[in-house]
């Protein structure tokens, strides 16, 4: 066997095992994001009426989005916690824990009494559950991505790593369609009990995900590392002290994709529903369709990154956000279904697809194996908090400040995307790096 083959961890994996790994990465993350996006969508159209009914109007919506932000704030904690354990104990075991935690939290949200039933305790419990949900997601993505990334051939690492990100729009599609079906109920029934059904279905989805995930073996590069003697320094501490530049780049490079998700995946849906020119069910169906095109764009972007490099593809997506921010929001304001789909296609599918599709491989190639779970998870989840966690609240406030106009939202979107552009320009290309030689 050649030296090149020996240095390629995927050689000992086998095609059948690799397909199982990619399926586990995709399906497990899809289930996790089904739960997470389900909450984001419900925060846009349900929770302001169910858990903040005593407030009303834009204030209730802001409070509802505030609980959404709480989950994003918790994601770096999850990235730090599960990243540390994943770098010490392995990627697979942490993925089982995060999946079970996410499913349990979603079922509890589905059983949570409303503000009318238990008063202020309802929103407080909602926030607590949302924080636990954020911690679970914070640990999920990095492990799922690395399990595929570290088992793939060098020439296809971008494509393999993207399966974890493809799970996000896939979960969005399922969550949106289930909520859309539930929203066809009479409004009183939907607000009383219909919105709970999608959350309770998480129990079934988690069981399916566990069956798949438990059959996957640990990555070769981590197994080799675990067997070798090494210094027992906390991985998170090592990331911040030995690799601060890599951490800063991984945070900055992830912000544009997360901003697109926060704006077009959460806030834009609420905005479209509030305009009352398009029915709620139609808005949710359009979002689901945009999820399909987002998966396709992620595949295109990831494949392209394996050919021309991660930086070039991500810079293209970032430039798209800067150029298209105003036209996309103009389409969103127009108030018809076709324009809404075009806005979501450009904002979610194209911009998010090209900025986020290659991101997993880009971030993973910044860190050595011993801290890779911690570095990628902490960087990605910090970017998610900064780029997506507060953008729905920020956008809602900017619309109010601008008297209903969206121009301030466009400016904010461009500014967030510019951060990613600067980070990418300061990074080196990693697609040809050997995983065992990084660091």
Image (cartoon, helix red, strand yellow):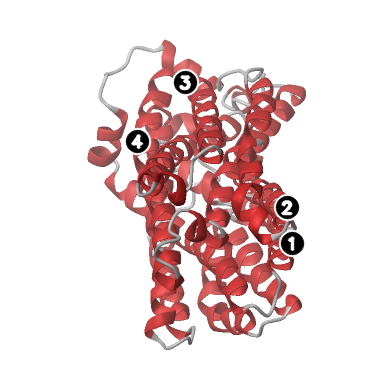
Residue drawn at (64%, 51%), measured in percent from left and top? 172
Q: Secondary structure at mark 1?
A: helix
Q: Secondary structure at mark 2?
A: helix
Q: Residues within 10 Å of mark 1 (few under 14, many from 20)?
A: many
When the figure is inspected, residue 281 is found, relative to residue 7, above or below; the finding is below
- Residue at mark 4 to residue at mark 2: CA–CA distance: 32 Å
Residue drawn at (41%, 45%), measured in percent from left and top? 122
Disc nearer the start of the sequence (4/2): 4
How far across and how far down the image is residue 349, in percent? 66, 63
Which marked residue is nearer to the observer: mark 3 or mark 2? Answer: 2
Question: Which residue position holds label 1?
Answer: 285
Q: Quadrant of residue 200?
A: top right
How far across and how far down the image is residue 408, in percent? 42, 82
Which marked residue is nearer to the observer: mark 1 or mark 4? Answer: 1
Q: Secondary structure at mark 4?
A: helix
Badge 1 vs badge 2, beta-carbon distance below 8 Å: yes
Disc nearer the start of the sequence (1/2): 2
Q: Quadrant of residue 338?
A: bottom right
Numbered tag placed on residue 90 in the rendering:
3
């Amino acid at each position: 066997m050649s030296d090149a083959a020996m240095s390629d961890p995927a050689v000992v994996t086998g095609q059948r095992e690799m397909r199982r790994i990619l399926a586990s990465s995709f399906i497990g993350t899809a289930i996790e994001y089904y739960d997470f996006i389900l909450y984001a969508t419900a925060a846009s159209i349900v929770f302001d009426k169910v858990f903040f009914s005593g407030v009303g109007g834009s204030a209730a919506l802001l409070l509802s989005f505030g609980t959404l932000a709480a989950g994003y704030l918790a994601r770096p904690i999850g990235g730090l916690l599960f990243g540390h354990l994943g770098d010490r104990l392995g990627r697979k075991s942490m993925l089982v824990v995060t999946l079970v935690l996410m499913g349990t939290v979603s079922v509890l949200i589905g059983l949570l009494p409303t503000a009318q039933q238990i008063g202020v305790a309802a929103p407080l419990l909602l926030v607590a559950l949302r924080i636990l949900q954020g911690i679970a997601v914070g640990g999920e993505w990095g492990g799922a991505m690395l399990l595929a990334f570290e088992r793939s051939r060098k020439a296809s690492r971008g494509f393999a790593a993207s399966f974890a990100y493809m799970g996000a729009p896939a979960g969005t599609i399922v969550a949106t369609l289930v909520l859309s079906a539930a929203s066809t109920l009479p409004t009183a029934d939907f607000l009383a009990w219909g919105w709970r059904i999608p959350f309770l279905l998480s129990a079934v989805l988690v069981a399916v995900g566990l069956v798949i995930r438990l059959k996957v073996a640990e990555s070769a590069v981590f197994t080799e590392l675990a067997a070798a003697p090494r210094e027992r320094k906390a991985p998170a501490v090592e990331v911040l002290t030995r690799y601060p530049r890599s951490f800063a780049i991984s945070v900055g490079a992830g912000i544009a994709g997360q901003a697109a998700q926060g704006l077009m995946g959460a806030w834009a849906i609420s905005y479209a529903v509030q305009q009352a020119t398009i029915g709620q069910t139609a808005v949710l169906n359009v979002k689901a369709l945009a999820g399909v095109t987002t998966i396709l764009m992620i595949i295109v972007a990831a494949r392209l990154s394996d050919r021309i490099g991660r930086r070039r593809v991500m810079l293209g997506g970032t430039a798209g956000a800067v150029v298209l921010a105003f036209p996309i929001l103009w389409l969103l304001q127009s108030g018809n279904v076709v324009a809404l789909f075009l806005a979501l296609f450009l904002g979610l599918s194209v911009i998010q697809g090209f900025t986020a599709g290659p991101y997993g491989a880009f971030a993973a190639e910044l860190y050595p194996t011993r801290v890779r779970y911690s570095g990628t998870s902490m960087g990605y989840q910090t970017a998610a908090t900064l780029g997506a966690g507060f953008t729905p609240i920020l956008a809602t406030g900017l619309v109010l400040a601008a008297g209903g106009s969206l121009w301030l939202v466009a400016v904010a979107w461009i500014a967030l995307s510019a951060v990613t552009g600067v980070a990418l320009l300061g990074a080196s290309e990693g697609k040809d790096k050997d995983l065992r030689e990084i660091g």
